[in-house]
């Protein structure tokens, strides 16, 4: 099975927009990887996430705000020979984004970003109470690097 690099930015963005969760990689306080699934929104080259106002993720980000965020869609088990275990693969497409987290503190901007996140999941309109907006940490990650791959294609298949 072959792996192909996706060079078209619109195709990579399509992978992102078709995911219902992303996996955010952070460096913990001991220098170890820490990966957590999160809900997100995406607009104009910026990923938006949200979390509680305190916790271990935020402590880690205070020390190192670099993140790697991954997305994966279209998972399908494929094989070249049904009886040969090593010929099996998982066909899928993935995107990986790197950037630095900053936090949005302005209440109106927080509401705007929460709308971006909610639009990723629903067409409904929402109102946010002052306490809810005040007590949520809103993350923004301008994407510095974006890559994509297609996995599990047979030699004669095109990406």
Image (cartoon, rainbow, N blue to C red):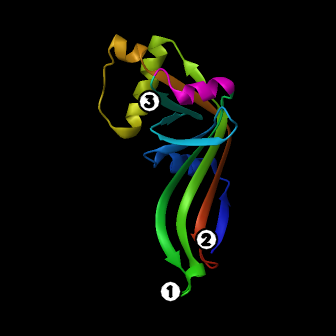
Would you say residue 111 is visible in this rendering? Answer: yes
The verdict on residue 40 being magenta is no
Q: Secondary structure at mark 2?
A: loop
- In the picture, the quarter occupied by the N terminus is bottom right
Residue that carries the numbered disc 1 in the rendered image: 82
Left or right: where 107 falls relative to 64: left
CA–CA distance in space, label 3 to label 2: 34 Å
Q: Which mark is residue 116?
A: 3
Left or right: where 128 falls relative to 54: left
**Extreme front residue here?**
30
Residue that carries the numbered disc 2 in the rendered image: 158
Position of residue 19 measured from the top left corner of the image (x, y, whole percent): 46, 48
Q: Secondary structure at mark 1?
A: loop
Labels 3 and 1: the sequence-earlier one: 1
- Against 61, residue 129 (above or below) is above
CA–CA distance in space, label 3 to label 1: 44 Å
- In the picture, the quarter occupied by the C terminus is bottom right
Seen at 66% across and 64% down, the residue is 4
Residues in magenta, as a range: 53-63
Q: Secondary structure at mark 3?
A: helix
Position of residue 150 measured from the top left corner of the image (x, y, whole percent): 60, 62
Seen at 35% across and 12% down, the residue is 131
Disc 2 versus disc 1: nearer the observer: 1
Seen at 56% across and 81% down, the residue is 85
Disc 3 versus disc 1: nearer the observer: 1
Would you say residue 44 is visible in this rendering? Answer: no
């Amino acid at each position: 099975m072959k792996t192909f690099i996706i060079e078209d930015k619109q195709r990579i963005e399509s992978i992102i927009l078709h995911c219902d969760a992303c996996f955010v990689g952070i460096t913990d306080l001991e220098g170890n990887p820490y990966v957590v699934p999160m809900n997100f929104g995406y607009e104009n080259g910026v990923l938006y996430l949200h979390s509680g106002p305190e916790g271990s993720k935020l402590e880690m980000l205070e020390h190192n705000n670099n993140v790697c965020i991954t997305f994966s869609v279209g998972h399908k088990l494929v094989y070249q020979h049904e009886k040969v275990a090593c010929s099996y693969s998982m066909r899928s497409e993935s995107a990986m984004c790197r950037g630095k987290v900053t936090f949005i503190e302005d209440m109106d901007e927080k509401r705007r970003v929460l709308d971006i996140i909610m639009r990723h999941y629903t067409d409904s309109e929402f109102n946010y109470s002052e306490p809810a907006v005040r007590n949520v940490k809103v993350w923004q990650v301008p994407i510095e690097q974006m890559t994509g791959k297609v996995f599990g294609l047979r030699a004669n298949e095109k990406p």
